Amino acid sequence: MKTFRIIGRNFRDAFKGVFRNFSLSFASISCITITLIVVAISIILSDNVNNFTELVEKDVTVVAFIDNSLKDDKIDEIKDKISVIDNVDTYEFKSKSDITKDMRDSSDVFDSIMKNWNDEENPIQNTFQIKVVNIEKINDVAKELKNIDGITLVKYGEGMVEQLVSVFDVVHKISIGAVIALVLVTAFLISNTIKITINSRQREIGIMRLIGASNLNIRIPFIIEGLLLGLLGSIIPIIITIYGYSSVYKHFDGYLFSQFIKLIPPTPFVYITSLILVGIGILVGMFGSWRAVRKHLKI
Amino acid sequence: MDLIRLTKVKKTYKTGVTAIQDLNLKISKGDFVFIIGSTGCGKSTLIKMLYREEKPTSGQIIVGGIDVGRLRNGKVYKIRRKIGVVFQDYKLLPKSTVYENVAFALEIFGLPKDEIHSKVVKVLELVGLKNKIKNYPSQLSGGEQQRVAIARAIVNGPKLLICDEPTGNLDPNTSLEIMNVLEEINKLGTTIIMVTHDINIVKRMNKRVIVLDSGRVLKDYKKGTYQNENI
């Protein structure tokens, strides 16, 4: 009971603290709001880049062309050899008739050209279509495939895939770095703003010490106040995240610039991002208060 | 029985100034003691050491069975809960009402609301401020503010009440009112140590008087023996 009473009192005091020192609280809240908006933008960008990279990676297929004269037993032999290559995720045999059918289905032009081909005339080769686990090592898989007897040609969009992946990797790393840096900067910025709030309440802390409040007794209301500031500061960034991102998604119909860059669907993405924002806001507010109040305690 | 015992206490500040030296003192439970002396004689340092705002450089200070000098900073609250302190400048929270200022001292210990209410009302009645419960400090006179500070200091039922020039900012009549309040509290069993410059009050109260000079006890007058002293 006693603990609940103390917790209840701490929350009441924290609320009072926020509203009785409203101008300074407002400064802290604004500071948290602005930074969380930037953090939200960074998270949205970073996650979308990540998502896009994953989609591209999933799409990349290594095509191994096989000599059309090979018999089924030789094809099975090649299949076994592919199955033991490191970094191979899935592989599938596609005969030239399968490919022809796919191509005819996909376009009227192809259909009109190909419909008259018979099996001998058809220049398309049988293939194995291979997906890899780690796209950065796709080149090694291609090399091993080339060495297999019966495979005449290996293609996977060399150069472009590696370049694209490494560019995305850099963008992803930069955006994660930016989020971390922003969070740290906010923590210190908020800590300094809260420090001003707490400096103005030095008298209060002095009196608390005098009447026998332990360091924990003094600290907790201020830390809860930091929590409330963080919570209040995250309201606007959350609204912007939920409604802003959803309307951007709607406006662009889920794609950015072209059908190639697909955006992450808003649900549940915006809610997860909002939770992260609240979490960052609360933690940063609490850390800021903890750091600021520490100065006034003889520990 | 001794509530306070100081043995060979010395206090030298980092600046090199020695405020207290070779001080031996005993104060019994239920005593009312005045500490007087000229400015810089070590009065403030002495009482600050009692409530552990300062640490002695050497020697031993026992308050209510606790070796105050050995208390770590994080444990200071243990002694503060046994001591009430009243200052010349009242140290009230300006944005809190009289009731809130006094209740503050009980709330941090998680007492139930009803108990807080009854204790606060009782103590405000004792200091004669029951009718000003909802006022803010700025709406009170100096004497009334000091009475709020006294109420806050004693609401926990401390064994010892330390008063650092509580009448320093007050006119003679108001000062007497405060002294009457303190006398009432003392009668209820609380030991009181009061630092003051007001010789008239000291003479009128007829209590034990300790005269400090250059950080030492110059004279220690038993109750009723103090007549005059040039300070």
Image: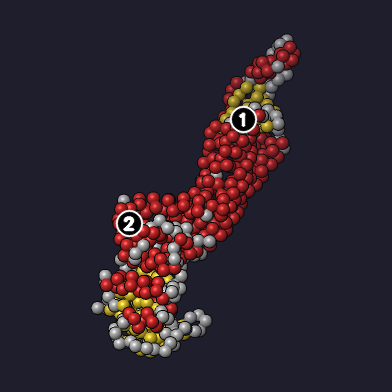
| Mark 1 element type | strand
> Would you identify the image quadrant in which residue B90 lies?
bottom left
Report the front residue among A252 and B177: B177
Examine the rendering and report whether any part of residue A133 can be seen. Answer: no
Colour option used: secondary structure
Q: Residue at x 50, y 52 (%)?
A: A18
* Mark nearer the viewer, 1 or 2: 2
Q: Residues within 10 Å of mark 1 (few under 14, many from 20)?
A: many
Residue for badge 2: B116
x, y percent for residue A46:
62, 41
Residue for badge 1: A130
Asked if labels 1 and 2 share a chain, the reply is no
Report the front residue among B193 and B202: B202
Q: Residue at x 57, y 56 (%)?
A: A193
Is A235 positioned to the left or the right of B190 in the image? Answer: right
Going by the numbered disc 1, the residue's amino acid type is: Ile
Above or below, B60 against B83 in this view is: below
Q: Quadrant of the C terminus of chain A?
A: bottom left
